[in-house]
């Protein structure tokens, strides 16, 4: 903090910076400025439930902070700061555009200083030291360093159980002959007068939105976040891990934590979640594989995505190494699940339409896999994920979509494209038995668009894939297909999925 910043300088919090880690501790004495800027809500067609969550979180923060907070509703952030009339402190924002904006405000004297964000376990400066001159990144390297640095699941210098990673035990298909996992339900927040007010205001604003309105399903306050965390740790974590990659049509939440929203709003700190999970293992309440899988998602993957967003810079979403230029179809953008026949894709779109949320395998191996096979434009796809998902804040999606899902960065983040045929979806979900398409067929009216699409993708990128040790066998297998020409011709004409 600059030496000339006064001890009574107020702190301005964005709507995704609302937890005690940001306004408590050394800042607990400061006045807080909260701004609801309506212009920002009109810029893009966000999911209706996402707008509800963000406004509900902001207004609940105002209520919680009481007399300490000044809450201004206006057209723009600049209007609010000028009306407030005092220079403010602000934590590092969570997007490149917002960071550029606050530095401009600092030059104009409306912002006194920009502070390092406490929303993540690892500060940005320390990641920059870790990254050094690397040109290729492996999450496993970062994850192990995080475990050592924060002493999580460690016995001295060694990982608990003498293994860093329990992926192999966390990839089981869904249990047969049951429609749900049968685990206790997650924490469901109870809507209050603030939620009612938000819903009325959104109706009145007539904003361009996608998806449907619905009950608020995710925690937006620190108290709700702690209840959601406790519910997950006590009742659901023991079942997590084993089926974390599985998909069940009648069990959208399965044993997932549903903590991504409160984490991304800043009302739950990642180390709180990680340390709670570790305690559950140490106390004998949850198995190591489940706990390690959950910790890897947060201390590993989530932190990794945050830091690579900043490391790769604002031009990262322009990467398009696979030369993918197909516009997103209207049924995709409109979340028109009824226009889709393939059960896996239909259910994934239904999840986005009805809740603004699906779990990571539906994102990567259904929606992302489909987009990869069909060559959807990566930048447009990134924008869609960022606006259609309730947890899809600006920093979250570029590396997840451009790097992981679409392999559009040429391998900076992932060593191979995450393309798969219907066999993978048939193994990891219960969708295929009720589907009009046959996951074993690649040619004909009932040919699975994922199976046929996979071979069409391999054919389209055969030279690149042949040069990659992890995908070379796919090209060899493709070259042995006797009906390849027919599959390629069929998929070039396919318009229905």
Image (cartoon, helix red, strand yellow):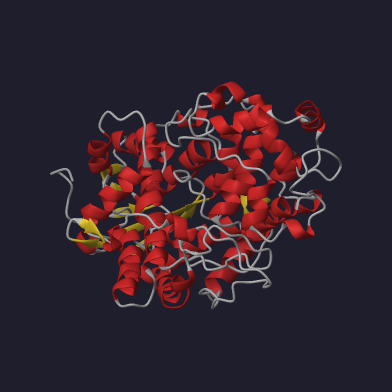
Query: Which of 325 and 9 lies nearest the eye of the viewer?
Result: 325
Horizontal arrangement in the rendering, residue 107 relative to residue 383 (left or right): left
| Total labels drawn | 0
What percent of the width, then of the height, locates residue 289?
40, 64
Horizontal arrangement in the rendering, residue 364 relative to residue 223 (left or right): right
Q: Is residue 58 above or below residue 182?
A: above
Q: Name the residue: 31% across, 68% down.
A: 278
Residue projecting furthest to the right: 445
Residue 314, quarter of picture: top left
Residue 112, quarter of picture: top left
Q: Name the residue: 82% across, 52% down.
A: 436
What percent of the width, then of the height, locates residue 52?
57, 60
Viewer can see residue 202: yes
Q: Name the residue: 65% across, 68% down.
A: 176
Query: Which of 379 and 79 lies nearest the eye of the viewer?
Result: 379
What percent of the width, then of the height, locates residue 124?
28, 43
Query: Which of 220 and 43 lies nearest the eye of the viewer?
Result: 220
Q: Name the residue: 61% across, 29% down.
A: 475
Viewer can see residue 207: no
Q: Quadrant of the C terminus?
A: top right
What percent of the width, then of the height, locates residue 146?
27, 51
Residue 444, quarter of picture: top right
Query: Which of 419 and 75 lies nearest the eye of the viewer?
Result: 419
């Amino acid at each position: 903090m600059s030496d000339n910043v006064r001890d009574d300088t107020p702190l301005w919090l964005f709507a995704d910076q609302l937890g005690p880690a940001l306004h408590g501790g050394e800042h607990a004495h400061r006045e807080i400025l909260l701004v609801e800027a309506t212009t920002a809500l009109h810029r893009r067609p966000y999911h209706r439930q996402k707008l509800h969550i963000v406004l509900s979180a902001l207004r609940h923060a105002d209520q919680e902070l009481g007399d300490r907070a000044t809450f201004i509703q206006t057209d723009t952030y600049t209007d609010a700061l000028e009306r407030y009339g005092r220079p403010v402190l602000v934590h590092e924002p969570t997007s490149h555009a917002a960071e550029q904006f606050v530095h401009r405000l600092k030059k104009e004297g409306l912002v006194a200083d920009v502070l390092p964000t406490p929303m993540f376990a690892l500060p940005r400066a320390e990641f920059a030291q870790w990254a050094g001159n690397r040109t290729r990144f492996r999450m496993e390297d970062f994850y192990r360093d995080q475990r050592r640095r924060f002493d999580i699941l460690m016995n001295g210098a060694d990982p608990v159980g003498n293994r860093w990673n329990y992926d192999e035990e966390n990839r089981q298909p869904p249990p047969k002959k049951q429609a749900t996992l049968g685990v206790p339900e997650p924490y469901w927040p109870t809507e209050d007068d603030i939620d009612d007010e938000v819903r009325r205001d959104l109706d009145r604003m007539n904003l361009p939105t996608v998806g449907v309105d619905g009950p608020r399903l995710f925690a937006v306050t620190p108290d709700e976040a702690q209840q959601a965390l406790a519910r997950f740790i006590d009742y659901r974590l023991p079942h997590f891990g084993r089926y974390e990659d599985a998909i069940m049509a009648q069990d959208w939440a399965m044993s997932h934590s549903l903590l991504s929203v409160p984490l991304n709003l800043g009302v739950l700190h990642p180390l709180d979640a990680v340390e709670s999970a570790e305690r559950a293992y140490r106390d004998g309440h949850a198995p190591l594989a489940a706990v390690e899988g959950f910790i890897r998602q947060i201390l590993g993957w989530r932190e990794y995505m945050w830091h690579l967003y900043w490391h790769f810079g604002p031009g990262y979403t322009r990467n398009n190494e696979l030369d993918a230029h197909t516009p997103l179809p209207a049924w995709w953008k409109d979340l028109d699940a009824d226009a889709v026949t393939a059960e896996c894709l239909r259910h994934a779109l239904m999840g986005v339409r009805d809740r603004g949320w699906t779990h990571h395998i539906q994102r990567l191996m259904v929606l992302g896999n489909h987009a990869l096979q069909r060559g959807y434009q990566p930048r447009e796809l990134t924008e869609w994920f960022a606006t259609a998902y309730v947890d899809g804040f600006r920093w979250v999606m570029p590396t997840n979509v451009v790097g992981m899902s679409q392999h559009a960065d040429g391998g900076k983040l992932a060593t191979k494209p995450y393309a798969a045929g219907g066999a993978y979806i048939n193994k990891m979900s219960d969708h295929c038995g009720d589907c009009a398409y046959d996951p074993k067929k690649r040619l004909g009216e009932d040919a699975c668009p994922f199976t046929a699409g996979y071979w069409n993708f391999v054919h389209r990128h055969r030279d690149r894939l042949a040069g990659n040790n992890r995908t070379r066998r796919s090209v060899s297998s493709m070259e042995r297909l006797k009906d390849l020409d027919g599959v390629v011709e069929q998929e070039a004409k396919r318009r229905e999925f």
